Amino acid sequence: MRAFYLVPVIGVLTACDPAVPDSAAGVGFNTPEYQAQREAVLEGQTINGDPLIPPSAVSTEGLAPAQAGGLIQPNPIEDPITTTATAYAPQPTDTAEDIARETAAALAAANANSGVAPVEASPSNPAPDLISSPSISDEQDFQAVASRQTIQSDAERIAQNRANYQVIAPTALPERTSDGTPNVVQYALSTSHPKGTQMYSRSGFNLAAKAQRNCAGFASPDQAQAEFLANGGPQRDRKGLDPDGDGYACAWDPAPFRRAVQN
C-alpha cells in the first residue's frame, strides 16, 4: 500500500527537476566552425578568403631615433639588427636552415659595415690574462714557491734565522715602590684563615650597625681594607670596620688573591 503512494510522488519530483546540461558538450569548442578556424590559425591559412592578419595591420614605418635629451641616446653605429632586417627578408618557401643561414650572413655583413670588430667564439682564442695582486700570497702554490726557492736556499734561510736567534736571560723583578699605603695583596698572602673566622677581640655596642654605616663611605672593599690596616688593623679597629674580628674590613675577602697565586 505504501509503495503505491510513493510512485506518484516520485513522478511529480521528476517533472519539477530542471534538465541538467551536458557538460561534456563544452561551450562550442567541438563545433565544426571552431575546429576549422583553429586549424586555419595553426596552419597559417585564411578564413573565408581573408588573411588572419591583414596587411594594413602591419606597419612598415621605422622607429625614429630618440631625441638628444631623452632617456635613450641615438647610437652613431649602425644597428646590426636593423641592417639584418633590411638586408634579408624570409620567403614563404625558406626552411628553418635557410632562415638561420641568411640571417647569420646578413648579421656578419652588418658587423663588417659598422666598423666594430666582432668577437668570435673559438677554442683558438687566447685565455684572458690573470691579474696578479702583490697583496695576495702565493705561499700555498707549490709551483710558484718551487720556481724561486730551492733546498739550498731553504738551508741558508734556516741558518740565517738561527744566527739571528737570541736568548734573553731572565732578570729579577723590579722592587715595588711604596707610597706608605698598606699593601692589601701582601696582607692577603700573609694570612691563611678564611673570612668570618674571629682572630682578634672586639668590644662595644651595635658593632654590626656601626660597621655597616662606616663601610658605606668607601668606594671599594680594597680601600676599606687599606684604611683598616693603616689605622692599627688588624689588631685594632678604631673605625669599626671589622666587627667580627677576622682581620678583614667590611666586605673585603683575601681568597681571590690566594687563588691567583696558586694558579
Image (cartoon, helix red, strand yellow):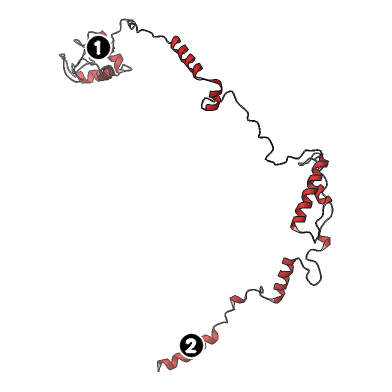
- The image quadrant of residue 92 is bottom right
Q: Residues within 10 Å of mark 1 (few under 14, many from 20)?
A: some
Question: Which numbered disc, 1 or 2, marks the residue that appears first in the sequence?
Answer: 2
Residue 180, horizontal then vertical, whole percent: 30, 5
Of residues 135 and 3, the one nearer the viewer is 135
Res 4 visible: yes
Element at badge 2? helix
Residue 52, horizontal then vertical, whole percent: 78, 66
Residue 10 tag number: 2
- The N terminus lies in quadrant: bottom left
Would you name the residue on which mark 1 appears?
Answer: 187
Residue 121, horizontal then vertical, whole percent: 70, 42
Side of 49 where 202 appears, left or right: left
Res 81 visible: no
- In this rendering, the answer to whether 196 lies above or below 27 is above
Element at badge 1? helix
Side of 129 where 166 appears, left or right: left
Of residues 219 and 144, the one nearer the viewer is 144
- In this rendering, the answer to whether 165 lies above or below 24 is above
- The image quadrant of residue 178 is top left
